[in-house]
Image (cartoon, rainbow, N blue to C red):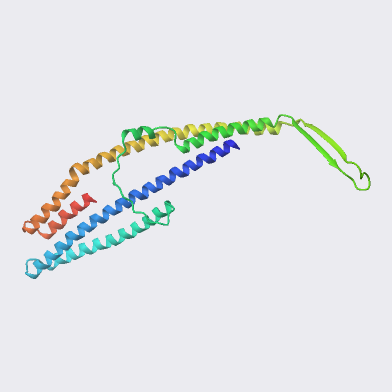
Amino acid sequence: LNQQWKEASINEKITTANLEKDVAEVFYRLLILTEKQHLLERVDSLFVDFLEKTSNRLKYGEANVMEKASADLQRSQIKIQLKELKTVYNISLLKFQLLLNSNESYQPNGEIVSEINHEQLLVNNNLDHPELQLLKQQIVSNQVAVKLEKAKFLPNLNIGYYTQTMQDINNKGMFNSVQLGVGIPVFTKAQKAVVNASKQKVELAENEYAYQALLFKNKLQESLANYYTQKEIVNDYKEKQLPNAELIFKTAKAQFAAGEIDYLQWIMLNNQAISIKS
């Protein structure tokens, strides 16, 4: 029973780890949605400015109806995306509040890209995960179960003391008796089968732990490889692609104002920059 209690304690650790994971996922999802909203709002302001200029150009005959219709269409799509994003954000916020078990609504605040330092990777690169701890504890629980079944081969000792009175027979005294018994197992075949079955459970638990430990190592290495790949991609965006996106925004605005590019080229260039930022 003590060993089973330890299993329950480890299960509590697993629940805690899963809860922390769920909270972290929703936390960063909300941060990403916030950044997407900022991007859409920026794009919306770009098309508001574009629409205003197009309307003036149309008024003086420098633009056609298609140019204005295209600008209206682009801005309408952005508004729809903003509404959809707001709905997703509110739903995620409700889930965040539920996971925190709080009546108060909390707004996440932090950086989207959170790098893991080398020391943290070394700390996490071990077999001390709660799920593996549980499997290891199940081996111990099965081992003590074997001892318990073996103990049933031992004799049972019983002792009892009785005292009673009988009305109209002995009103002045008590009838007292003592009982002593020794129970010796005679038919042990069934119990031996139970013991052997318990030993098989130990072997199964040991095999399961060995397999899951190997699987855990492989998954960890796979996750680390994926992390380093994504880290390189993020660094590439920070160093090259995001600055180029800003350059495209700036250049497209200047060239369109100077009449060096038409509205279709302006839209194409801005959509390219928006895609990179997104």
Residue situated in front as seen by the camera: 203 or 41? 41
Q: Residue 121: x, y in percent?
A: 35, 34
Q: Is residue 179 above or below residue 264?
A: above
In the figure, residue 141 lies in which quadrant?
top right
Q: Which residue lies furthest to the bottom in this view?
A: 59
Q: Residue at x 29, y 40 (%)?
A: 115
Q: Is residue 122 above or below residue 259?
A: above
Q: Which residue is drawn at 33% across and 57% down?
A: 89
Residue situated in front as seen by the camera: 172 or 71? 172
Q: Residue at x 50, y 39 (%)?
A: 10
Q: Residue furthest right?
A: 169
Q: Residue 276: x, y in percent?
A: 21, 49
Count of marks placed on residues = 0
Relative to 142, is 158 on the left or the right? right
Relative to 276, is 123 on the left or the right? right
Quadrant position of the N terminus in the picture: top right
Q: Residue 172: x, y in percent?
A: 91, 43
Q: Which residue is drawn at 16% across and 47% down?
A: 244
Residue situated in front as seen by the camera: 273 or 148? 148
In the figure, residue 178 lies in which quadrant?
top right
